[in-house]
Image (tube, rainbow, N blue to C red):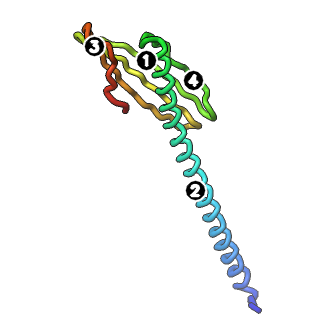
Amino acid sequence: MVKFNRCGGGVKLRVLVCAVSLVALAGAIVALLQTFESRKADDHRKAVLLSEYGLQEAFNKLRESSYEWDAGFKDEPYEDGAFSVAVARDSRGDTLYLKIRSTGVMGSVTQTKECTLRREISEEDTNWVNEGIR
């Protein structure tokens, strides 16, 4: 059994209680940060999926309308998040461009994907060429 003298016993006990409290507090902070990091990683992954889903929906609408659709989507809910799609048309010289920008939102995370389609203005070429997704 530990004996505490009248002058120093209380101080040692208080220091011990403070040290144990600090260790417990540090453990709680680490656990909280790990949970937060895990949620943010899940939200980021889901936001990427939502932006890709928005592009897919835009491609479907464009195919259905013979590439005349340009209304886009605004804050369309999907699963636990939402996506928005903007479509812009441009012509430079003899080339038509169709730029599709899809934004997925999950929680506080936003992820954007863009795709540009190109078509030469000529009688032989009627296909849109995908210039890539960024």
Apparent side of residue 29 relative to residue 87 in the rendered image (left or right) = right
In whole angstroms, how far apart are the C-alphas of marks 2 and 1?
A: 39 Å
Residue that appears at 46% across and 19% down: 86
Q: Is residue 43 left or right of residue 117?
A: right
Q: Please name the residue that numbered disc 4 is placed on.
A: 75
The mark lying in front, picked from 2 and 4, is: 4
Mark 1: few/some/many CA within 10 Å (<14, 14-19, 20+) = some
Mark 2 or mark 4, which has the lower sequence index?
2
Residue receiving disc 2: 34
Residue 65 spot, x, y in % from top left: 47, 11
Mark 4 surroundings within 10 Å by alpha-carbon count, few (fewer than 14), some (14 through 19), many (20 or more): few
Q: Amino acid at mark 2?
A: Gln
How many numbered discs, if any? Answer: 4
Spot occupied by residue 18 in the image (x, y as percentages of width and height): 67, 71
User: Is 124 or 2 nearer to us in this picture?
Assistant: 124
Up-down: is 14 above or below 28?
A: below
Between disc 1 and disc 4, whose residue precedes?
4
The nearer-to-camera label among 2 and 3 is: 3
For the residues labelled 3 and 1, the Cα–Cα distance comes to: 22 Å
Type of amino acid under label 3: Asp
Residue denoted by label 1: 87
